[in-house]
Amino acid sequence: MKQLFLSVLLAMGTVVAVCAQQPLAGKRIGVLGDSYVRNHREPVENTWHYKFAQRQGMQYYNYGRNGNCISIDLNRWGKAMVNRYQEMNDSLDYIVVIAGHNDATRLDSIGIDLFREKLTELCDGLIDRYPCAQLFFFTPWMRADNDVNAHNFEAVVDCILKVCASRAIPVFDAYHHSNIYAQNDRFRDVYFQNGRRDTAHLNARGHDRFLPIAEHFIMQYIALDK
């Protein structure tokens, strides 16, 4: 009997220890975005955000769509994020938006004013729909200086930083501050899905490289949110 009692106590202690190590266990995280989220042609399970959710014991919802924009609907790539965020799960504890790449590549036709307007609408809509959730935003990677759209990416990232700051939404500025050197050909050969021809899509190795950076960024705010 004594041995049984000790076994029960040990089991309870293990459960408590696991819960202490995984304060987010059972929480719901939704990730909204483009092919950075959908992971282009590779499994979603390779992404850093899926792996983060698994490590934390969270319920994971992927709302990524290849080619998707924040600001405009596209015949091939579907409704813009500003028009489809309401299709997400009604109950989410954490929301991560990873977006802006496809808006930047089309910014000459979209215009920065419309992008800012729709980004603001998306941020306000997420706050209103999920007033108790913690929101996060991740910008696109840096572009090479000789890239024809480099200046548009800088404009989009700057807009994301300013709009999110005005709404107190934490932003990870992956354009200026990450361990992903997307402007370098040899780096992309190792860490991107299509090598140096690809400037957007991390492979499994690339996601593993970025995971601890992204996890540290998110967890510092979650610690404050306990």
Image (cartoon, helix red, strand yellow):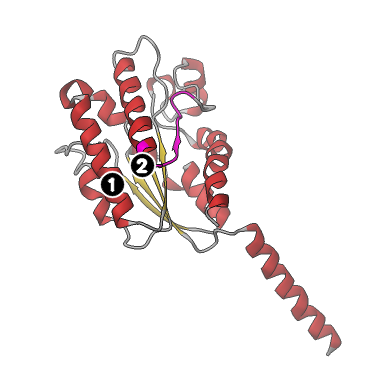
- The residue to which callout 1 is attached is 124
Say what secondary structure mark 1 lies in.
helix
Give, as a three-letter code, the residue at label 1: Asp
| Residue at figure coordinates x 37%, y 51% from the top left | 62
- Compared across the picture, whether 1 is left or right of 152 comes to right
Q: Position of residue 64 (x, y in %)?
A: 33, 45
Q: Above or below — where is 208 with respect to 141? A: below
Q: Quadrant where the C terminus lies?
A: bottom right
Q: Above or below — where is 109 with respect to 17? A: above
The label shown at residue 59 is: none
- The residue to which callout 2 is attached is 167
Give the alpha-carbon distance from disc 1 to disc 2, as whole Å.
Answer: 8 Å
Q: Position of residue 78 (x, y in %)?
A: 19, 43
Q: Nearer the viewer, residue 8 or 132?
A: 132
Magenta segment: does it hold 61? no
Question: Are the two marked residues, 1 and 2, in contact with CB atoms closer than 8 angstroms?
Answer: yes
The rendered magenta stretch, by its main secondary structure, is classed as loop
| Residue at figure coordinates x 44%, y 23% from the top left | 195
Q: Position of residue 21 (x, y in %)?
A: 65, 58
Residue found farthest to the front: 166
Give, as a three-letter code, the residue at label 2: Arg
Q: Quadrant where the N terminus lies?
A: bottom right
What stretch of residues is rendered in magenta? 166-176
Residue found farthest to the bottom: 1
- Figure quadrant of residue 115: top left
Q: Position of residue 28 (x, y in %)?
A: 44, 59
